[in-house]
Image: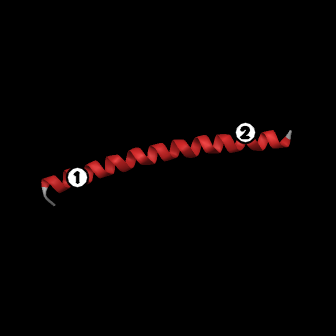
Amino acid sequence: MSESSLKKAEKKVQALDAQIKSLQLDRDSLAQETKTLKEDNKR
């Protein structure tokens, strides 16, 4: 692998890591929302 394709690959990995982190945050907040809604329904 050439130096530049290695750098491109590293950038892609970093971008994907950022996407994954933001998706995990989305999932966590949705899970929290779902939990809250379920508790509201019980009342």
User: Measured from the top left, where is residue 38 in percent x and y?
Assistant: 77, 44
User: Residue lying farthest bottom?
Assistant: 1
Q: Is residue 34 left or right of residue 24?
A: right
Mark 2 and mark 1 in contact? Answer it, CB < 8 Å. Answer: no
Of 33 and 6, the residue lying toward us: 33
* Helix, strand or loop at mark 2: helix
Picture residue at 20% right of the left edge, 54% below the top: 6
Tag 1 residue: 8
Identify the amino acid type marked 1: Lys
Can you give x and y, in whole percent of width and height, for residue 13 in the image? 32, 51
Q: Secondary structure at mark 1?
A: helix
Q: Amino acid at mark 2?
A: Thr
* Picture quarter with the C terminus: top right
Residue at numbered disc 2? 36
* Residue 29, horizontal then vertical, whole percent: 60, 40
Which quadrant of the figure has residue 33? top right
Quadrant where the image shows the N terminus: bottom left
Residue name at image x 62 percent, y 44 percent: 30
